Amino acid sequence: MKGVTLWLGVVAAGVWAADEAVDGGASGAAYRDGTLELSWDNGTRRWSIAWYTGAGAWVGNDFNLATISGYRAISKIRFYSRSNWPNAQWDGFRLGVFDFRGSVPGSRLWPTAGGGYFFKPSGLNGHVWVEVNIGWTCPTTAFVAAEEQFYNWPNCDPSAVDNNPTFLRHSWLYSGGTWSPLSSASIEIAPYYNLMLRVVVNNETLAVSPASLGRVKALYR
């Protein structure tokens, strides 16, 4: 069986074009394995993004597991970043999963305490997919997986958007206490707004062999 990624975005206060930095350059190739991976990006980077005052700002993608029977366990979150811009090292970022049962992301579901799960990559260089083990069962079918820049420029790890000029309206920005579509805030990167952040899920109940699954592209709405 051929591999099959489920292919499965409001203006944030205080975050405008003048408050961000972007970088283009060589495209990054998406890392793939044999698991069921949810994504909205096409695997090719267009811009790397870092907020000048990015501490506390989150970017994320919404996903919906309603059409994937039994798949509720989030194995990993994959986040496309780079080690050599805006400085020459990894600084670390935080990850979180937020509720998405309304028109915008809601309260944080994971982790249940603190401000997010801090992760600092190591052993990775250049443009890469940073893979973080999660191992948590989501209590809702619809959710937003997100990354917080955590540190201000230039001591930070950037996020990235792909080179698809059509915004699929599943990428979000949280800043100043408000969630907004990424397209409303990141004016300088127009028209590229699809965040390169993915989620790997599994179905322990059905015990599906990871080797039998790969990437499927299908819109759920």
Image (cartoon, rainbow, N blue to C red):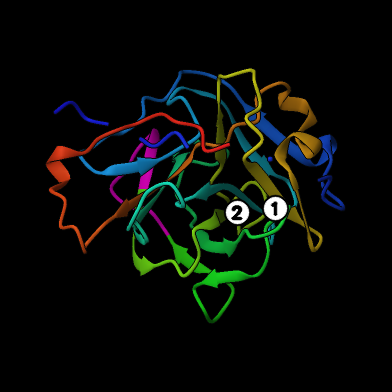
Mark before the other along the chain sequence, 1 or 2: 1
From the viewer's side, name the closer residue of 145 and 206.
Answer: 206
Rendered image quadrant of residue 102: bottom right
Q: Is residue 128 magenta?
A: yes
Q: Secondary structure at mark 1?
A: loop
Where residue 208 appears, as percent x and y from the top left, is 16, 51
From the image, give the main secondary structure of the stretch colored magenta: loop
Q: Is residue 5 above or below residue 42?
A: below
Residue at horizontal 34 percent and vertical 31 percent from the top? 216
**Which amino acid type is marked by label 1?**
Gly
Q: Is residue 207 above or below residue 211?
A: below
Farthest residue, direction bottom: 113
Where residue 148 appears, as percent x and y from the top left, is 59, 57
Where residue 154 appears, as percent x and y from the top left, is 63, 46
Q: Is residue 4 magenta?
A: no
Q: Residues within 10 Å of mark 2 (few under 14, many from 20)?
A: many
What residue does disc 2 label?
149
From the viewer's side, name the closer residue of 187 and 106.
Answer: 106
CB atoms at circles 1 and 2 under 8 Å apart? yes
Residue at horizontal 42 percent and vertical 58 percent from the top? 120
Q: In the picture, which quadrant includes the C terminus? A: top right
**Which amino acid type is marked by label 2?**
Gln
Residue at horizontal 68 percent and vertical 64 percent from the top? 106
Q: Residues within 10 Å of mark 1 (few under 14, many from 20)?
A: many
Q: Which residues are magenta?
A: 120-130
**Distance from the alpha carbon under mark 1 to that under mark 2:** 6 Å
What number is the disc on residue 54?
A: 1
